[in-house]
Image: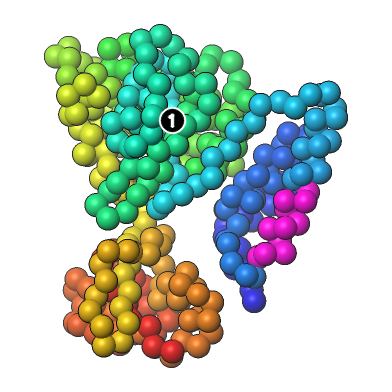
Amino acid sequence: MPANLSPEYLAAEKRFRSARTLDEKILALEEMLAVIPKHKGTEKMQADIKRRLSKLRIEGEKRTGRKGLSYSIRREGAGQVLVTGLPNVGKSSLVGRLTNASTIVANYPYTTQKPLPGMMFYENIQIQLVDMPPMAYEPADPWYANMSRTADLIVVMVDLMDAPDTQLELVAEELARFRIRPAGWPGKEGDTYELEKPMLVLGSKADHQETREVLPELRRAASGLPVLAISNETGQGLEAVRTAVFRLLDIIRVYTRAPGKEHDLSHPFVLKRGSTVADLACEIHQDFLEKFKYGRVWGRGKFNGQKVNRDYPLSDGDVVELRI
């Protein structure tokens, strides 16, 4: 079976081959493992990456003489979204309001010491939010860079009461050290980027009257990045956050039905925008793709039961019947 490797995987593999230091090799292998398509055709490749990763980690521990702290969060749901920013901007409060996570909220900095995941509902799917430790004013640990590279979306929170445009610039500089350019961000001359990542900017404490004056400045500093004003205290803008996260993940929800049965709209398959009937069949089971004859599709702008082939592009909300 062909591996059908994604551009993200091929880019990570290229970084591994050109890596010079042990940390660079480990980061590249961790990213390869995170983005490699998970199906039967890549099982041997996944096992090989895990063996190489284990060997390099052991080598690193021998060199340092101790086992350093390293974190990774297994992705769940329709996408993994990191919530980051400088200390005391309201990250933990936001994740606590939007998910079932038991976050630690206090009025002093650095209360979040390690990444903490929670699941956010958007209509009939769940999206994983990860409350990240705050970005400091010194380089972050390698695991922080790796999680930023493999996440599907980065949410940056800034405090509207404390020079939010400067906060955003500092976070962007840290991402540049990770070789990450926020999608659409112009960057600075001389910066070298290897990866573009969608990013959402949230300005907290929007319930304060004086923050209205700084919002235009923040939007100018964001240089076209989406910006939302929110309040963890009143709940202002939080529903808009759910919608914006779903949109920026660039995913669609597709439903299936058995021949002669009613539509089942309770458990959608989540696919990247631009996916085809063949991608859906492969997601269900490889046998469906190998035995596929044709499909029927119900959805907005289509006539009911429209007959389609495997290359037919799907849209959010489509219902598909696969014939094998």
Residue 216: in magenta span: no
Amino acid carrying label 1: it is Asp
Residue 47: in magenta span: yes
Residue ID at (24%, 18%): 205
Residue 205 appears in the picture as rendered: yes
Between residue 81 and residue 160, name the one nearer to us. Answer: 81
Q: Quadrant of residue 18?
A: top right
Between residue 324 and residue 209, name the one nearer to us. Answer: 324
Dot 1 alpha-carbon crowd within 10 angstroms: few under 14, some 14 to 19, many 20 or more: many
Q: Quadrant of residue 206?
A: top left
Where does label 1 land, which residue?
131
Give the side of residue 122 with respect to residue 250, left or right: left
Q: Quadrant of residue 241?
A: top left
Between residue 146 and residue 189, name the one nearer to us. Answer: 146
Residue ID at (75%, 57%): 48
Give the side of residue 31 with respect to residue 49, left or right: left
Residue 306 appears in the picture as rendered: no
Provide residue 159's location: percent of width, then percent of height.
32, 17
Provide residue 224's location: percent of width, then percent of height.
32, 36
Q: Quadrant of the N terminus?
A: bottom right
Give the side of residue 31 with respect to residue 206, left or right: right
Provide residue 3's location: percent of width, then percent of height.
63, 68
Give the side of residue 16 with respect to residue 185, left or right: right
Residue ID at (29%, 36%): 98
Label 1 secondary element = strand
Question: Which region is colored magenta?
Answer: 42-52
Residue ID at (79%, 40%): 56
Vertical side of 80 occupied by 227: above or below: above
Vertical side of 114 occupied by 253: above or below: below
The kind of secondary structure the magenta stretch mainly shows is helix
